[in-house]
Amino acid sequence: MKFLRFTNAQKKPVFGKYLDGSVFEINGDIFGKYSVTDIEYDYANTVPLAPCLPTKIIAVGLNYEDHAKEMNRTPPEDPMLFMKPSTAVIAHQEEIKYPGHMSNRVDYEGELGVVIGKRAHMVENEQALEYVFGYTCINDVTARDLQAKDIQFTRGKGFDTFAPIGPFIETEADPSDLHVRTFLNGELKQNSSTKNLIFSVPELVSFISKVMTLLPGDIIATGTPSGISPMSPGDLVEVEIEGIGKLINHVSS
Ligand code: MG
C-alpha cells in the first residue's frame, strides 16, 4: 500500500492512501488507528506534504563500497551513524534552499529511507523488519565543504530543507534489492541497488535500536551509492526508487 500526506479540502494536513492516480483521505494516524474514507482527490491536484513527521532522521554514512571509494574512505566496521534534525524535512516538490551564506558546495545523496512503524529498542536482526512500517525516498542533502571542515556532520547535514522525503511510503517493498537512481537536471547521476548496501536494512534497524529507541515515523537514511556531485540554485534533483516513487525537488537560492 502507498501512503502519503497532503492538505485536504478543509486545509487540514491529513494522511491519504494513493491508488492509481487517486488519493483517498484517511481518518486518523497511519502509525496508530485509522480508516480509509471514500473521500477521493485527484493526485495531480493535491499539494504533497512530507509523508510522515520523524522525531529524528538517523543517517548512515559510507554504506556503499563504491561511495566509500569515491570519498577515499575505507568502509567502516560498524554502521557510521549521524543525525539530521526534524526541521530539515521538506516534502516532494518543495524547494531545497541553498545556504549560500555558509556553503559553496551542496550535494544531493539519493537514498532509501526506512520508515519505522513501532517503538524499537534492542531489536535483533531476525525481528527487525517487524518494526518497519514502509519505505520512502530521501535526499540526504549535504554541504560537502562544511562536512569536511567541521569533521562533525551536524552543520553540513542539518540545514533547513536538507531532508526532502517522499512522495510516498510504500509498505510492501522488499528492501534487499531496490533500484536507486538520482537524476540532476534529467541526467542520471547515481544508479545502484540496495543489494549493494554494506549493512542491510535489518542490520541497520537492529544496530540503531541498540543505540537509541526508534519511534513510529522515524526515518533511517540508509546511505548513498557513488555518483555524488554538487547542485546549484535552479537545479532539479530527482531521487527514484523502484516500486516506491520519485522524489522531485528544485534548488533555490
Ligand atoms: Mg547520506
Image (cartoon, rainbow, N blue to C red):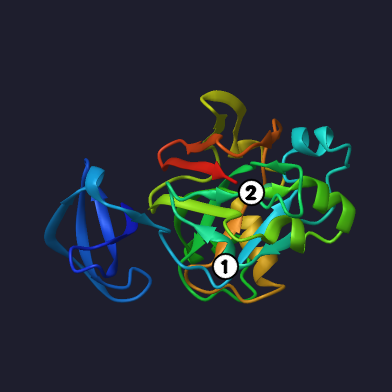
Earlier residue among tags 2 and 1 = 1
Residue at the (72%, 40%) spot, across then down: 64
Q: Secondary structure at mark 2?
A: loop
Image location (x, y in percent) of residue 229: 71, 33
Query: Would residue 242 be visible to someone looking at this image?
Result: yes
Q: Going by the image, does 153 lie left or right of 34?
A: right
- Numbered tag placed on residue 98 in the rendering: 2
Three-letter code for the amino acid on which mark 1 is drawn: Thr
Image location (x, y in percent) of residue 204: 66, 58
Residue at the (49%, 53%) spot, across then down: 165
Residue at the (43%, 64%) spot, across then down: 52
20 or 185, which is in the foreground?
185
**Cα distance between the residues tagged 2 and 1:** 15 Å
Q: Going by the image, does 148 lie left or right of 11?
A: right
Q: Going by the image, does 76 lie left or right of 223?
A: right
Residue positioned most to the left: 38
122 or 49, which is in the foreground?
49
Image location (x, y in percent) of residue 24: 19, 57
Q: Secondary structure at mark 1?
A: helix
Classed neighbour count for the residue bearing mark 1: other residues with Cα under 10 Å, few (<14), some (14–19), many (≥20):
some
Three-letter code for the amino acid on which mark 2 is drawn: Tyr
Disc 2 versus disc 1: nearer the observer? 2
What residue would you read off at disc 1? 87
24 or 10, which is in the foreground?
10
Query: Would residue 80 be visible to someone looking at this image?
Result: no
Vertical comparison of 104 with 121: above or below: above
